[in-house]
């Protein structure tokens, strides 16, 4: 299995575009599937913020979506999906009704109001611009789009947290099948290499795991969390099958983030099937977990320092202040 660009845009039928306010440290990311994609979703965190996820359940009438919107701004950021709807409607893309074509744009948000300017949030215009910026080129990573205000490692408070961002990954399964992932990384927990367990980013401390877990129990929880993202494959699957792929992709989150799926995270993964040949469901799900874990690590490594938080792209963590 080899990757081409290590981006979800390696999956035929997928485009990605970012838009952000670099001073306010917030933004949004549009994932377009202009010809439609069968989609599923799995929400694991205790504090989700989503839009149009009920229609992804098996048995619901609408079978395909036309875009996903990932955004910062907490619940305010859900407005960015309205901009994607306007863009798609202008391009005559959507679910056909007698009166109009209605774009189907599920969305998920993360909390970034505590980094940058909390009064500026992703809105419909920013969502529209993200769609204008969308292309099949390799999607930018780091401090862009929905990852503009993302951070990791907040169990001991923001003082010891680190900057994070957007990351992506992909792999080939043979016979032209590609599985890709994109993630906006903003968890309460820390990031670890799923292959060897090595600490990547998070709480800037050299204490043993048990020690910081004890410390964290005495620190007021930080609610500014959530990992949101998507996996995609160019194969034919049903909504029920893509729901299973989304569920399996969460295994990748659990491998790379400790802890994951807490009461203070709104962890949400969408799964998209853009059509094409047949593929084994379990194989695709297992690969989805792998590329999602890789995307998490890349999101941490691509982030630059911002908002007073150090990022791995331009800092050396050694010598940082320890709790």
Image (cartoon, rainbow, N blue to C red):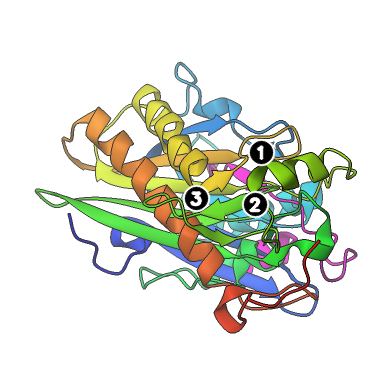
Do labels 2 and 1 touch, CB within 8 Å? yes
Which residue position is annotated with label 1? Answer: 51
Residue at the left extreme?
175
| Residue 12 left/right relative to 222 | left
Q: Is residue 278 magenta?
A: no
Disc on res. 81: 2
Which quadrant of the figure contains the N terminus? bottom left
Please state the horizontal and vertical placement of residue 85, each as a whole percent of the image: 60, 52
Disc 1 to disc 3, C-alpha distance: 12 Å
For residue 26, above or below residue 186: below
Given residues 307 and 139, the one toward you in this image is 307
What residue is at 30 percent from the left and 45 percent from the top? 233
> Which region of the structure is painted magenta?
101-129
- Is 123 a magenta residue? yes
- Residue contact between numbered discs 2 and 3, judged by CB atoms under 8 Å: no
Give x and y (percent) for residue 298.
46, 64
Determine whether 293 is above or below 58 in the image.
below
In front: 178, or 64? 178
Mark sitting earlier along the chain (2/3): 3
Answer with left or right where residue 281 lies relative to residue 299.
left
- How far across and down, in percent of the image, does residue 83 sit? 65, 58
Gap in angstroms between the C-alphas marked 2 and 1:
8 Å
């Amino acid at each position: 299995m080899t990757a081409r660009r290590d981006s979800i845009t390696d999956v035929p039928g997928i485009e990605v575009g970012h838009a952000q306010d670099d001073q306010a440290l917030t933004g949004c990311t549009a994932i377009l599937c202009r010809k439609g994609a069968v989609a599923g979703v799995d929400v694991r965190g205790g504090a989700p913020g989503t839009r149009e996820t009920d229609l992804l359940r098996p048995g619901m009438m609408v079978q395909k979506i036309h875009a996903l919107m990932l955004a910062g701004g907490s619940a305010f950021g859900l407005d960015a999906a309205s901009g994607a709807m306007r863009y798609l409607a202008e391009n005559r893309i959507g679910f056909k009704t007698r009166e109009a074509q209605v774009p189907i744009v599920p969305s998920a948000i993360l909390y970034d109001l505590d980094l940058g300017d909390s009064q500026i949030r992703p809105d419909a215009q920013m969502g529209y611009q993200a769609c204008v910026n969308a292309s099949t080129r390799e999607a930018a990573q780091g401090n862009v789009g929905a990852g503009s205000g993302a951070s990791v490692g907040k169990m001991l408070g923001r003082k010891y947290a680190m900057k994070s961002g957007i990351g992506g990954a992909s792999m080939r399964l043979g016979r032209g099948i590609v599985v890709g992932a994109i993630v906006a990384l903003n968890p309460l927990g820390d990031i670890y290499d799923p292959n060897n367990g090595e600490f990547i980013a998070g709480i800037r401390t050299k204490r043993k795991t048990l020690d910081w877990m004890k410390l964290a129990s005495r620190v007021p929880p930080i609610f500014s969390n959530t990992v949101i993202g998507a996996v995609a494959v160019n194969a034919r699957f049903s909504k029920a099958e893509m729901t299973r792929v989304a569920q399996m992709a969460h295994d990748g989150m659990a491998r790379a983030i400790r802890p994951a799926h807490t009461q203070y995270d709104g962890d949400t993964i969408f799964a998209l099937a853009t059509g094409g040949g047949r593929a084994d469901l379990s194989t695709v799900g297992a690969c989805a977990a792998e590329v999602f874990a890789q995307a998490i690590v890349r999101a941490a490594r691509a982030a630059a320092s911002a908002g007073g938080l150090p990022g791995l792209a331009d800092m050396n963590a050694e010598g940082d202040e320890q709790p």
